[in-house]
Image (cartoon, rainbow, N blue to C red):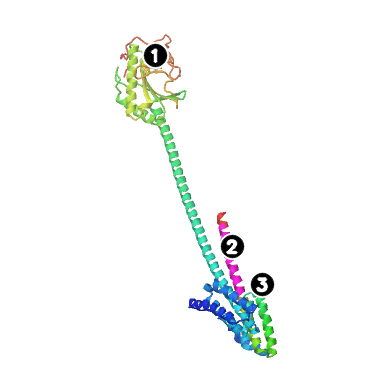
Amino acid sequence: MSKMRRTFYGPGFAAFALLGAACGGAAAPSTELLSARNAYSEARNGEAAKLNPTGVHEAAESLQKAEAVHKDDPGSQREKNYSYIALRKSELAIASASEALARQEQQRAEETYKTELEQKSEQASQQSNQFAQQLTQTQRELQQNSQTLQQNQQELQAAREAADQAQAELRQAEAVREEEGRMIISLSGVLFEPAGHTLSKVAERRLDTVAHALGAYRDRQIVVEGYTDAQGSESKNLELSQQRADAVREYLEQRGVDAEHIRAVGKGESNPIASNDTAEGRATNRRVEIVVERESTTPSSRGAIGSDGSSVKSGSADLSPSSTQGSSRSATPAPSSPNRTSLPRTSRPADEPAAPRE
Amino acid sequence: MHAYKLWIPALSVLAACGGAELNQTRATEVQAAVLAAEQVGANDQPKAALHLQLAKEQIESAKRLAADGDQTNSNLLLDRAKVDAELAMQLARTEREQENARQAWEKIRDLKKESAR
């Protein structure tokens, strides 16, 4: 409807105005009429035509009246008055369209504001979720770390208790001493069959306890040292002590001691800890010592001959067969001295059953 | 239909009491338009205030012409006054809406500034 009106009053009215001007002949339009025509033209060609067609229509009607009066009574006060009203009607139409435009602009701004707010809110929400996830993750990790720490502490405590218990068991069952940070477990008495190197049942039970205790020292190097009394030939004794040390090593390996951390050394009749002149002394000297080395030390500080018979370290003079037959043998036993003194040997063959033997 | 036209009956009574020769119907409509323009704040905006002032002056002129017996020109002046009052009101409303739109965009700029911080 409004489009029809614009169509009717737009070009139609322009033709009417031109016709009026032409017919007016000499009578020129008043300044007011010219202003009214210009204002109407602006209204009709501007936003007002779209946004306020009714207002533009009213302006057109007013201008038609002014043009009619101009035709009938050119230059009159009536023409000026109607032109004035027509001018204001056009201005009114334009101002009204501007109001509608401003309202649209405001609406657009409010929608934009709402969108911006929603986006901002969405971003804040995402950020908040991200922080919450990070917090949850951190809390989870913290909890895991705490659990791990607690577990480690429990394991450490358990290991300490196991070590303490193992040591207590050992101290109860066997002679245990410490030398320069090394723990030495000395097993004497009947361990092997006479003149042989097969472990007795009793010895196996004792070694079970030792193996259990050694579980607390998995990171340490262990040396099994075999000793004989001074009866028999020295070379035989050395060979026998090596066989016995190997037997103990093998048994301990079977009981869980890491083969990488254990080796056996035969020491023959060296380092006696009692007199070889008495049966009791010889029995004491026939022994196996299990040495648990200090932490982070090489397993050679005591010097030894390896299980393959070769010399592992020759720094200690009393380890080689020749040194064991030296003249410094004493009848005085030195059971716990780190630098144990060699004791005198007898001429009896190795493990000859002159004294209580295994 | 403008809202001020609802006030016309009351204003007609007031105008009638004045005892003037003015066309009462037209005078009432003009007075209502003037009141409406004032209510939307036409006095506070220069352009609107100018048209409001013109309307008032033309009412006074119309009264004088009516008193002189020139009813025709008096009526024409009342018509002019009315359209000036209507324009004053429209200009005031337009200005107010434009100010609202400016503030709305200002709010968006502030929000964007805040977000960029």
From the viewer's perspective, tell me whether residue A301 is left or right of residue B72.
left
The part of the image, by quadrant, that contains residue A183 is: top left
- The residue to which callout 1 is attached is A320
Q: Secondary structure beneath disc 1? A: loop
Q: Position of residue A56 (x, y in %)?
A: 55, 77
Closer to the eye: label 3 or 2: 3
Q: Position of residue A187 (x, y in %)?
A: 37, 23
The part of the image, by quadrant, that contains residue B26 is: bottom right
- The residue to which callout 2 is attached is B106
Please report the bounds of the magenta region as a residue range: B90-112
- The residue to which callout 3 is attached is B46
Label the magenta part by its dominant secondary structure. Answer: helix
Q: Nearer the viewer, residue A75 or A263?
A: A75
Q: Residue at x 52, y 63 (%)?
A: A112
The residue marked by circle 2 belongs to what chain?
B
Is label 1 in contact with label 3 (beta carbons under 8 Å)?
no
